[in-house]
Each structure stands twice: as C-alpha cells, then as structure tokens.
Amino acid sequence: MKCLILVDIQNDFLPGGALAVPEGDKIIPLVNQLQAAFPLVVATQDWHPPNHGSFAASHPGKKEFDAIDLNGLPQTLWPVHCVQITDGAKLAPGLQRDRIARVFPKGTDIGIDSYSGLFDNGHRKSTGLGEWLKSQGVTEVFVCGLATDYCVKFTALDAAHMGFKTHFIADASRGVNLQPDDVTKAIQEMKRAGITILQSEDLLQPGGKLSRVITAPEPLPARFKQTAVFLAGSIDDGAAEHWQDVVIAACEPDSVVLLNPRREKWLAATDHHSRNPAFREQVEWELQALELADIVAMYFAPESRAPISLLELGLWARSGKLIVACPDTFWRKGNVELVCQRYHVPLVSDLEQLIRAVRTRVAGPKPPGQILYTSKFLALIKEGHWEYVDRVNATGAALIIALTAEQKILLVEQFRIPVHARTIELPAGIIGDEPGYSEESQAEAARRELLEETGYDAARMDALTNGPSCSGITSERVTLFRATELRQTGRGGGVENEDITVHEVPLAEIGPWLEAKGKTGVLIDPKIYTGLFFLGQKQ
Ligand SMILES: [Zn+2]
C-alpha cells in the first residue's frame, strides 16, 4: 500500500511563524489535492518542550543558527519554535485534516532534535511512524512538506533506509536554504539514496488515478520516473478479447505507466508491410516501448494465435522483465511453457494471476536500468544512454597482493579469453552473493582464492582499498587485500580447467621482471602496480 507523509506543515513554519519557511503556505492547496490520491495519509508534527536543546535560547551566549554539539551530535540552533500546546505548533489551519489517519509528534526529548519523522537525529529512538506504516502494510511512501533541506529530507532518507520505496514530491515542499544551494544539495542526497523526485502532476490524474496510460502511437519519453509496464500479448489484428482494458483498470491505484500498443482502430492485415508509414510507426513504437519498459506483461488469450507476441516472447525471454500468462488451451502452450522454463520467465495460467504478479512487481523498487540481456554470469544493462555489465551472482571481487616471508610477490599467469593473450595479474576472484556478506567474508573469499590459485595459505589478510574495477564498463567493485604470513600448502594452479602458472618474484626485482615479461608479448595487468604502491607505503 502507498502512504502520503506530510512533514511538519505547522504554523511556525509558515510565513509569519517563528521559523518561517519561504512560501511554506503555498504548498497547502496542493497537499490537500494530493491527499485524495492516497489510500493512507499521515502527518508529522514538530513538538518541542519549551526549553528544547535545539533552541538558541536554551544555550546562554549562543545565537540563532550557530552550530553546536548537542550531546554528541552536531546541532544548528533555531529560534524557539513549535513548542508543545502553543498555536505555533498546531498543524496549519488550511490543511485538510479528515484524511490524516495519524499525527506523529517528534523532537519531544529535550536533549536531542528530530528532523526525521521516523527517528531522532542520533537514531537512538524511533517515533513509531515507520513501524506503524509497516503494520498497515505500507510498502511505498511519498514525502512532502516543510522543510525540504531538513525534516522532509531526513524523513525520506530514513524511510528509504527502512526499506520503503520512497518518493519526494518537490512542488509540494519548500526549503529553508540557510545556504543558497541547500535545497539542491538535499535533492541530490535523496537521489543518491534511491529516492525518486516527483512533481505532484506525476501523481494527480483526472479521477484520482495514480496510473497513466500511453497508447500507440502517442510519443514516448526518453525514460519514466514510475515503473513502466508494456502490455504485450494477443491482439490478432483487433480480434482478440480486450484484456488490455482489464489490466489498465486493475492498475489504476498503482504508481505505474502502462504502455498499450493496442489502438482503437487496427490496420488491415493487407497494410502490414514495412514500406507502409503507418505500419512502420506502430511497430517501431512497440519496439521502443518494449525497450523502455521495466516489466513486459504478456497475455496469450485462449482463442488467439498471437504471432507477434510469440516473436516478442523470443526477443525478451532473456531480459528478466517478462511475466507471462498462458492458458492451457492456447495453441502453442507447450512452446511457451518450455521457453519460460529454460529462461526462468515467471509463467501463470490466467489474466487474474498475471495482474496480481504485475502489481506485486510494480510495488517493489524500480530497477536502475533496463536489462538488455542476461546470461549465466553477466547481465548487460542500459541506463540512460550508457551500457554496462553486472555480474549476476556476485557482490564484488577481491584482488590480493601477496608477499612471502622471503619478500617474494606471488603473481599468476594464464591465457585470458577476452584479450586472446597470456596475462600476468594479481591473484583474484569474485565474491559470491552469500547472505551476511561482510568484510570478514570478503577476506575469507580472498584467502580461498589465493590458496586455489597459488597454493599459499595466508594467516593474515588486510583490506587496503576498495573501488570500481572498471567504472565505465561494469558496476563491479573490487577490494584489494594484502596477504602476509604465508605458508605454502600446495601447488596452486586453480580449480578444474584453470591453467594457471604461479610466479614468485623477488620484490627487489619486480620492476625489471615485469618489463622483461611484457616484452615477450605477455600482457601485464596495471593493477599489479597498484598493489606494489601499497607495499611501498608504511604499514
Ligand atoms: Zn524543531
């Protein structure tokens, strides 16, 4: 379920109040309109005791907007505001109250401020809001109010951190801007935390709907803020049942864009050739919309033949974004079933189950990019105009600079398929996607890789640095470890069909040795020099 969170829309934060936010009153009509678009609305209320620690007046000798340390936390000192039971603390009179299910007070402890509506600034105590939302079945929250650069931002960040799919409604919020770019910075910080930035028009649809439908050949934007679902499946030149309308009606309460290829009047079958501009426009719209979609919902209607849907099933089977419904009576059910099994495509048997599966996925987080292709080890992702690869079953990689007691460096040489050459590298390996993954388990993985590749067991494994392994091409991050206190327990050489040669090179001779090797045509991985840099540093 979705919930609208109204942050601190109180008299003291409106023009004329003790801590006025410029134009704070301007958001109220919009906020009232937005309330109608949500099944659940809650509000937070700054609710301070008279001598609260966030007030400059509580600290003799300090001025308003001074920065101090308050019980171990940095604190900006504010004018006295939102004191319990005063008019200043009341919710704004223009704010519609009848749809607000609960009001959560915050900042009630003298010794600690609470910008966020969910936790105090030290995350020492919860206000109960997050837990309450979860108890109500809320999975997605929309945050707006006063002020963007303080209480709204921290409420949104905490909500995202608690696992809610979180959105910030920019035009239904206003900021303080103590520094001129504080609001801009707050928005950037929210974006970095995975929070989507919306305008109220993204949410306000005629009739209070949250969903939006784009029907071919309406123009398609470059990307969508909301999750986009392409309605693939039977049309049969307009003869198939109108299942698309059923899906569209069912998704009305969802924050989703539905891409519908089915137009009012379908082209006659005789016009289906690529030289016909109207036909070309339709097909190119479909191909573009399929690429943009986060989810491809495919329904094979029982009486239909659906040749184009079958083609699209083939195109998108490996994408990770297909959900298919195919009743047993569909004439090619067997083919559909076997394709879905092989490529792990979720398959259900009727329209009702398809709608449920799509709505469940829509309620989850929107993936950052489109999956163009997935395979056993890698996925090709497109995000904006950029393409890159993700490892499918790994969380990262470990690189090891290993130094023996005799001051020798361990390097590995093997034929590398992508570069078609023998390559000398640091011992390395990918780190699996195990639950409870931590720096310790990374060090364990690094130790195992070193042993497999070189035959040396390291009693000590220190993490040195972490960063992208090649930031233009892959999301992978690599941790560099220093392995010491080594003991040779085997010959190394890798597992199964890995053909690895281990080199033990005296540290004092490493530069000329690498140079000589490079002249023989072996490729030298520059990351070796990164490892050597760390060996040169004081330990
Ligand atoms: Zn306050």
Image (tube, helix red, strand yellow):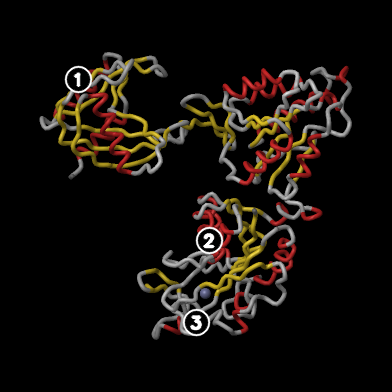
Eyeballing the image, is 86 above or below 462?
Answer: below
> Can you tell which mark lies on residue 456?
none
Q: Which amino acid does label 2 sit on?
A: Glu
What residue is shown at x 77% (from left), y 55% (from top)? 208
- N-terminal of the two: label 1 or label 3? 3
Distance from disc 1 to disc 2, alpha carbons, whole Å, reads 55 Å
Residue 299 shown left or right of residue 464 in the figure: right
Q: Is mark 2 on a helix, strand or loop?
A: helix
Of residues 359 and 11, the one nearer the viewer is: 359
Q: Where is residue 196 in the image (x, y as percent from the top left)?
A: 60, 51
Q: Is mark 3 on a helix, strand or loop?
A: loop
Residue 108 shown left or right of residue 97 in the figure: left
Q: What residue type is labelled 3?
A: Pro
Distance from disc 3 to disc 2, alpha carbons, whole Å, reads 24 Å
Q: Mark 1 points at which residue?
A: 491
Q: Quadrant of residue 269?
A: top right
Q: How many labels does the image show?
A: 3
Residue 129 shown left or right of residue 206 in the figure: left
Residue 49 shown left or right of residue 517 in the figure: right
Q: Mark 3 points at which residue?
A: 49
Q: How crowded is mark 3: few (under 14 residues within 10 Å), some or many (20 or more)?
A: some
Q: Which amino acid does label 1 sit on?
A: Arg
Eyeballing the image, is 260 above or below 238?
Answer: below
Distance from disc 1 to disc 3, alpha carbons, whole Å, reads 70 Å
